[in-house]
Amino acid sequence: MATLLHLPLSPYCRKVRIALGELNIPFALEEEPVWERRKAFLALNPAGTAPVLLLDDGHALAESQVIIEYLEETATNPILLGAEPKTRAEVRRLTLWFDGKFAQEVTDYLYRERILKRLAGHGPPNSEFVRAGVLNLEQHLRYIDILLAQRHWLAGKQFSLADITAGAHLSSLDYMGAVPWADHPAAHEWYARFKSRPSVSPLLADRLPGWRPVAHYANPDF
């Protein structure tokens, strides 16, 4: 069985966990405190970042998108990118959007400052960075609402890697109650569908020591 070295609320680790679930690939989980920079972990991934997927033969795969591309290429029923070339192009575009622009403008300010620094013991969050992340999140939620006015899932008719990536980032922010769902009903409805998928359910049990999530966090019908 493969083993995923991860951080519970990391969007990139969550992305891989959901993909493994959607592809029905069994795996074990091991938490990796990346800030400790363990020699054994750096030998697997010199970049020192999670996730890292250890295959049955001991081979290590690093970086979420690399891992998922490998899973798609080796799966008996690849389903994460869609069937049609134009759909696959849009799925890839949105995956890059959320792992790139959204991460830089929102996740890096909120997840890094409020969660990762807490886990690593690196002091309190920078209030200016948090404020910037909150303002940027509002703009991204508006864009999500625009997309969902035209489609059931973010890249069209079917659940895909675009939904996995967007949901992975937003679920980490939702843990801390940072997402104003009431102001964005289309995004709210989509996220409720996302949370209802069996592949997402295990993530909703994640907890940080000494920090309870927002009340609706684990409820798909919030």
Image: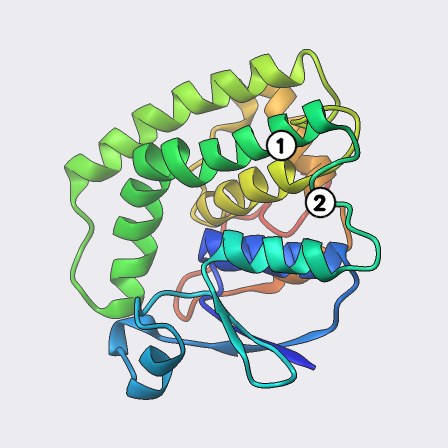
Going by the numbered disc 2, the residue's amino acid type is Leu
Depth check: give the residue in front, 221 or 2. 2
Q: Are marks 1 and 2 in contact (CB under 8 Å)?
A: yes
Colouring convention used in this rendered image of the protein: rainbow
Counting residues from the start of the chain, the first of labels 1 and 2 encountered is: 2
Picture coordinates of residue 183, whole percent (x, y): 52, 19
Residues under labels 1 and 2: Cα distance?
A: 9 Å
- The answer to which quarter of the image holds residue 140 is top left
For mark 1, what is the residue?
91
Q: Is residue 128 left or right of residue 99?
A: left
Q: Residues within 10 Å of mark 1 (few under 14, many from 20)?
A: many
Picture coordinates of residue 100, whole percent (x, y): 39, 37
Residue 80 tag number: 2
Residue 2, placed above or below residue 208: below
Q: Residue at x 70, y 82 (%)?
A: 1
Q: Residue at x 36, y 42 (%)?
A: 107
Picture coordinates of residue 38, whole percent (x, y): 29, 84
Can the viewer see residue 204 in this picture? Answer: no
Going by the numbered disc 1, the residue's amino acid type is Val
